[in-house]
Image: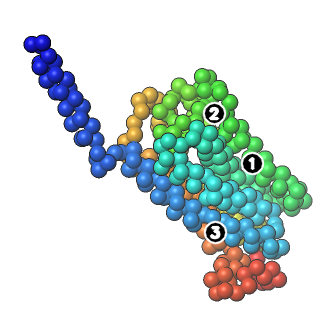
Amino acid sequence: MAGQPQFLIDNLSVLSKEIVCESTISPTDYDPSQVKITIIATVCIVISLISIPCNLFNIIIIYVSPILHNMNNILLCNLLFIDLMNGLIVLPLITVVSLNRNHDYNLCQLQGIILHLNYSASLTASLAITVDRCFAVVNPYRYKSYINKKRCFLIAICTWTVPIILAFLPVLGLHKYGLGKYFAPIFCGTSFDQFDNNHVLQAILNIFIVVITISIITCYTVIFIIAYEKSAQDILGSSNIKKSIRTTSLIVGTNLLCWLPFMIFNLLEYINRNHEISNKPTPFNITSLLLMLSNAAVNPIIYASTNKFIRKRYHQFFSSKNVFNIHDQNFQS
């Protein structure tokens, strides 16, 4: 009985320490991961609010305007559709998953699949646009006889093939071979936080991004070299091709600039192979991620600003005129 008071005192001491420790973790404390989540969720909402109306407007105008039904605009419309899906589905899902830490497992997998699918397809669509313009400049006569709407639609469909494979690999249960597993440190994706599960897929993704980047840079280098060595009339044949090259070079170039920091970040992470989980938000990794996500809002704005026909439709829209009047043939794409 003599030892009971001391026993009670010891228990109360331990309990009081636990209470003090728990009380020090308050919602007002600085939580790096929560700061990162808040920033990403807020920016995703803003990008969606810009992406959805702009991409939808551009797609509708292209669809109802026969003057815009050319080969280049078919491939551009594919990119606009991808950006619309990013704004309409991908970014809202990222916001929901990142803000709700008790999200459903299936929702996480769905968000991971759609994220990888759409943003990989954005790169392949940019490559298809670039190769199309390069072909038009290098061999304009063969281009006119070979490329038609049917082939352009087929090319647009093919741009989804590799992204579909890359997006579904992590849900096939092959993570023990390093072929990916979606999980959610912030939102669902493949991450270096679980390097053993994702190292092969991360290597494939890095190679995929680097190869596409080099291919796009090579194509536009060829285009600009030919444009420099020959007269514009000899190379391009018509003002429409010149305008389309200007538009696509701005869209694809901006696309690459948005992807470049993310690509550098991924390559550095893969080289370092850091197995420890780190939730510290750094300016570089947050900026690289948000720049990549911003493509969905940037691309339609560039397309509208460089296309005189689309610009006129925006002006009519804000002037409350008949924006879908398709009989105006005074503007070229």
* Residue topped by disc 1: 159
Quadrant of the drawing holding the N terminus:
top left
Residue 259, visible in the rendered structure: no
Q: Residue furthest right?
A: 145
* Residue topped by disc 3: 53
Q: Could you classify mark 2 by the number of other residues whose Cα lies within 10 Å: few (under 14), some (14-19), or many (20 or more)?
A: many
In front: 280, or 22?
22
Picture coordinates of residue 137 (x, y %)?
Answer: 76, 60
Q: Quadrant of residue 14?
A: top left
Q: Is residue 321 above or below residue 189?
A: below
Picture coordinates of residue 247 (x, y %)?
Answer: 66, 66
Q: Earlier in the sequence, mark 2 or mark 3?
A: 3
* Residue topped by disc 2: 170
Tally the marks: 3
Picture coordinates of residue 114 (x, y %)?
Answer: 65, 46
Q: Quadrant of residue 22?
A: top left
Indicate the amino acid at tag 3. Pro
